[in-house]
Image (spheres, rainbow, N blue to C red):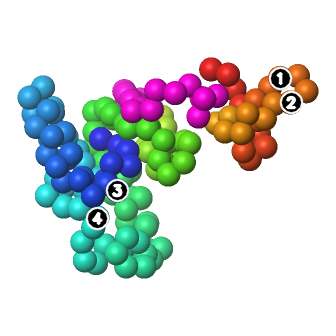
């Protein structure tokens, strides 16, 4: 499982549901944080205390190991802290894909790209939509 859900306060409940659903279908869920843990606890580097580079390296390597060992990736690409999916999730999906593993992505945000990004309604002289950062927005 990949996605920003581990950053939610209710992660342990969500994780237990994921594990249960996977077991029902005969799969084993590989979770970045066990179902009985939350990032909202004492001593979590980068969350409840300042992070260190070696902690980030360890998390990165653990994620890579999990991707290498899994059979497939299911990823939540719902926009996270903005208009785009979580960058870590996108990296995990790309890594799995590059390793030849099936990747299934889902989103809880059903808006089209141009509906998410064209915040101020700005258009160019030719009618192209422009996002708040000044970039052209695809109409997909």
Marks 3 and 1 sit apart, C-alpha to C-alpha, by 38 Å
Q: Position of residue 112 (x, y in %)?
A: 56, 25
Up-down: is 9 above or below 108? below
Bin the neighbour count of mark 4 within 10 Å (Cα to Cα): few under 14, some 14-19, many 20 and up. Answer: some
Q: Position of residue 131 (x, y in %)?
A: 72, 39
* Contact between labelled residues 4 and 2, with CB atoms less than 8 Å apart: no
Secondary structure under the numbered disc 2 in the rendered image? loop
* Contact between labelled residues 4 and 3, with CB atoms less than 8 Å apart: yes
Q: Position of residue 29 (x, y in %)?
A: 19, 40
Whichever of labels 3 and 1 marks the residue nearer the N terminus, that label is: 3
The residue beneath circle 3 is: 7
Up-down: is 18 above or below 5? above
User: Which residue is at the front of the view, 100 or 41?
Assistant: 41
Bin the neighbour count of mark 2 within 10 Å (Cα to Cα): few under 14, some 14-19, many 20 and up. Answer: few
Residue depicted at x 18% and y 53%: 12
State whether residue 55 appears in this view: no
Instruction: Answer whether residue 104 is magenta in the image.
Output: yes
* Contact between labelled residues 1 and 3, with CB atoms less than 8 Å apart: no
The residue beneath circle 4 is: 39
State whether residue 4 appears in this view: yes
Q: Is residue 18 left or right of residue 44?
A: left
Q: Quadrant of the C terminus?
A: top right
* Contact between labelled residues 2 and 1, with CB atoms less than 8 Å apart: yes
The residue beneath circle 1 is: 127
Instruction: Report the span colored magenta.
Output: 99-116
Residue depicted at x 43% and y 67%: 56
Residue depicted at x 23% and y 62%: 38
Q: Residue furthest right?
A: 125
Marks 1 and 2 sit apart, C-alpha to C-alpha, by 5 Å
């Amino acid at each position: 499982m990949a996605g920003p859900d581990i950053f939610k306060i209710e992660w342990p409940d969500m994780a237990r549901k994921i594990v249960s659903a996977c077991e029902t279908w005969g799969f084993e869920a590989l979770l970045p944080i066990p179902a009985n843990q939350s990032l909202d606890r004492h001593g979590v580097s980068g969350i409840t205390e300042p992070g260190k580079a070696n902690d980030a390296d360890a998390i990165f390597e653990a994620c890579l190991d999990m991707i290498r060992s899994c059979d497939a990736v299911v990823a939540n690409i719902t926009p996270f802290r903005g208009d785009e999916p979580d960058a870590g999730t996108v990296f995990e999906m790309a890594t799995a894909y590059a390793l030849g593993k099936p990747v299934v992505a889902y989103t809880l945000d059903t808006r089209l790209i141009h509906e998410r990004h064209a915040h101020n309604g700005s258009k160019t002289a030719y009618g192209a939509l422009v996002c708040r950062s000044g970039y052209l927005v695809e109409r997909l």
